[in-house]
Amino acid sequence: MMMVLSVITLVTFTACAENEEQANQDVPDEQNESNFEAENNNEPEEALNEENTTGNEAANNNEAENNAVNEAEENEEEAEESASETNEAADENEETNEETNETNSAENDSESGNNNPSENDNNNTEESEEFTELEELAVHFIDVGQADATLFKYSYEGERYKVLFDTGNWNRNDVANYLNDQGISSIDIMIGSHPHADHIGQMDTIINEFDVSEVWMSGDTTTSQTFQRVMDAIEESDADYYEPRTGDIFDVGPLEITIINPDSLTGDVHEGSISAVFKYGETSFILTGDAEEQTEQAMVDRGFDLDSDVLQVGHHGSSTSTIQPFLDAVAPDIAIISAGENNQYGHPHDEVVERILTADVDLYGTYVHGTIIVESDGESLNVLTKEDGTVTPPSTGQTAPSDSANDSETNAENETTETEEESSEPTDGACIDINSASQSELEEIIHIGPARAEELIDLRPFGSLDDLTRVSGIAEGRLTDIKDEGKACAR
């Protein structure tokens, strides 16, 4: 607005000056006065010019200030744009780094074969730590002659654990002596696979001489003096008592015990044998007592993962056990037979030894190697033996040599001869006459439980032991065991 007013003023004064000059030409006398007035008129014009100049300078100053403000705002906007570009560049760099990290992680996972890096890495770390924490497990397959006794011995987080599976024969004290030699004063769990005297023989002695926390039994019973002594010792002790069943799983420190038999009791003590998988880290052992072919097949049919590194061969290597489907399911690297040297039963039987060797399994026997110790660190195994030797079939198509003239294969008809007891102590050297014995006496015979004893009494008389195949569940295999035992006779 100031600049517009100044232009109008200049135009007005210019027009007045031209009129005055024309008038002076017409009236000469008044020239000096007119010139004086003109000079006086020029002073306001110069003042106005100065005012206009000042206004222009002020306007210019305002314009400069506005320009400075605009420039400052522009600089601020440029700074903000620059900062925004910097942030975008940083974000792009961060995304690039993340993509690079993901790529590197994917490459690492690809090399290691992991599909889920964080989860698998954590799992691998945990598994690695677990293995490094596991101390050595030593499994002692004790040389106890024609019997069974296996000791699991290990430590974890400063605590020592001992689990004993079967306790040797009734007429010896070698298991108790072995525990003392090992410096053992307590047993966490003592397991009697079934109530025959060559498996629970020294259980009462161990209960009385050692601190036993817990005892497991199958629940089957016999009338033998050995069984009665064991049950009395359990009742008089502070030990807990338990009868495990198929599907039970127990964690004893780092040792996991899975029960795979019995599912229920039938009265046949061999069918009721406690059988279990003992898992330590990534290594495993399977023990089945005297479980026979029908029980082994039942264990396969139940769908358990039987795959194990070490198999203790069932029933001392008898032909009644270690059927091919069961051996295939277990697929052991190592098999161990617990039997007495030159025992009267011919254990292990040739076909069992050949079956195991054909499966390319490393075979050991206490009757050859003495006590056998298998060490595990949770990942690998190491076998130690007291004696060197190789288990091979003793003959081809014949029974192993026996130190007894009453071997069942060479003298099958001599049922009355006294033999080494397998399930109970003999009574006055007399046989159990299947035609006259009471039910409780009949139950002392191998494979004869309460149900079969009742059926046997109903089917009397029997012309010979061979007629026992008339009893349900007794076929050639069990008949051979009955003859081998030497207790039964038919008069």
Image (cartoon, rainbow, N blue to C red):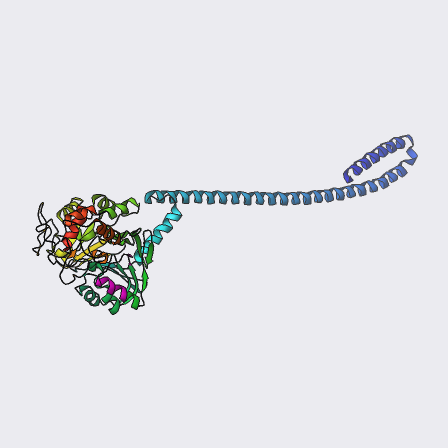
Give the residue drawn at x 19%, y 52%.
Answer: 315
In front: 383, or 369?
A: 369
Q: Quadrant of residue 325?
A: top left
Asked if residue 313 can be seen in this view, the reply is no
Q: In the image, is 226 to the left or to the right of 416?
A: right
Q: In the image, is 411 to the left or to the right of 374?
A: left
In front: 477, or 416?
A: 416
Q: In the image, is 43 to the left or to the right of 391?
A: right
Count of all numbered marks drawn on residues in the image = 0
Measured as percent of width and height from the top left, residue 165 is found at 24, 59
Measured as percent of width and height from the top left, residue 424 is found at 19, 60
Q: Quadrant of residue 236?
A: bottom left
Magenta highlight range: 217-232
Asked if residue 45 can be seen in this view, the reply is yes
Magenta region includes residue 79: no
Q: Quadrant of residue 134?
A: bottom left
In front: 168, or 482?
A: 482
Q: Quadrant of the N terminus?
A: top right
Q: In the image, is 178 to the left or to the right of 2?
A: left
Magenta region includes residue 218: yes
Measured as percent of width and height from the top left, residue 35 is found at 87, 38
Measured as percent of width and height from the top left, residue 321 is found at 20, 48
Give the residue drawn at x 74%, y 41%.
Answer: 56
